[in-house]
Image: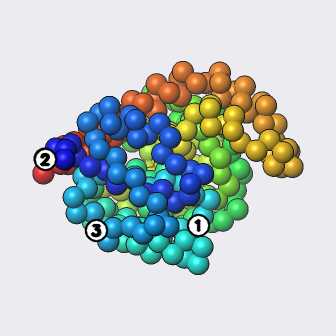
Amino acid sequence: MTDRPRALIIVNATSSGPKRLTEWLEEEGVEPVLVNGEDGLPEQLDGFSGLVMLGGGLMPDAYETAPWLHTERKLTQQAIDDDVPTLGICLGGQIIADVAGGEVRENYGPPERGSVEITPTADGSADPVLQHLGAKAPMIQHHQDMITQLPPAATLLATSELIENQAFRIGQHVRGLQFHPEASAENVRGWNAESLAEKGVDHAALVVQADADYDANTAASRALVGAFAAEIREAAKR
């Protein structure tokens, strides 16, 4: 038994797990509860003070491939309605955008791979979580599906050179991220070099850049997760 607040972490694909996120949450006094979507998800967020939805290489409505998305979308709506501290990462952020009335398009827009500079907007610089990116920070990206339109109720928090909608917030505590604060240069090193080469991407160059950005990436990611954990601890007191 524990008196620490609990955060539900939804794993949408085994290849896109929580990585260093769980360790950081534990260090911040939050108990991460990992659940694989394919094993079934809880129907409600009762008992959880936070929600994290990870990536998975799926579209937000890929029900035939991932039938648990029906439940994940219901949990997302509950998080929005109750303003539960939430981080939707990559697919997770796209689910938030789609559920709340935005638009996500498959295989659309410029792909971003490797370490990418993320720049907060004015609202992002004032946001308790995204402000920890500072003026800009390198974050790991590996996607091509794109949030092309934010929900009407969303506030844009961060952009990059190629992608406008890198981070957004609904209410005070529900945030969607296109980038991966849980990932690092170590994860880039494990990407499939042959597959990337077929797309004209130099894997070795991605690794070199991610290694060079490792310290800045880790500092910003750790601070971001720490601020998110603080919101979970505060929510547990409500």
- Residue ID for mark 1: 59
- Report whether 122 appears left or right of 62: left
Which of the two labelled residues, at mark 1 and mark 2, occupies the earlier sequence position? 1
Q: Could you say which is closer to the camera, residue 40 or residue 89?
A: 40
Disc 3 from disc 2: Cα separation: 19 Å
Q: Work out whether residue 165 can be spotted.
A: no
Residue furthest to the left in view is 238
Q: Secondary structure at mark 1?
A: loop
Which of the two labelled residues, at mark 1 and mark 3, occupies the earlier sequence position? 3
- Residue ID for mark 2: 237
Q: Residue at x 81, y 49 (%)?
A: 195
Q: Amino acid at mark 1?
A: Met
The residue carrying pointer 1 sits among few (fewer than 14), some (14 to 19) or many (20 or more) residues within 10 Å by Cα, namely: many
Q: Amino acid at mark 3?
A: Gln
Q: Work out whether residue 88 can be spotted.
A: yes
Whole-percent x, y for residue 111 in the image: 71, 50
The residue carrying pointer 2 sits among few (fewer than 14), some (14 to 19) or many (20 or more) residues within 10 Å by Cα, namely: few
Q: Could you say which is closer to the camera, residue 197 or residue 1?
A: 1
Q: Nearer the viewer, mark 1 or mark 3?
A: 3
- Report whether 24 appears left or right of 29: right
Kindly identify which numbered label has been placed on residue 78: none
- Residue ID for mark 3: 44
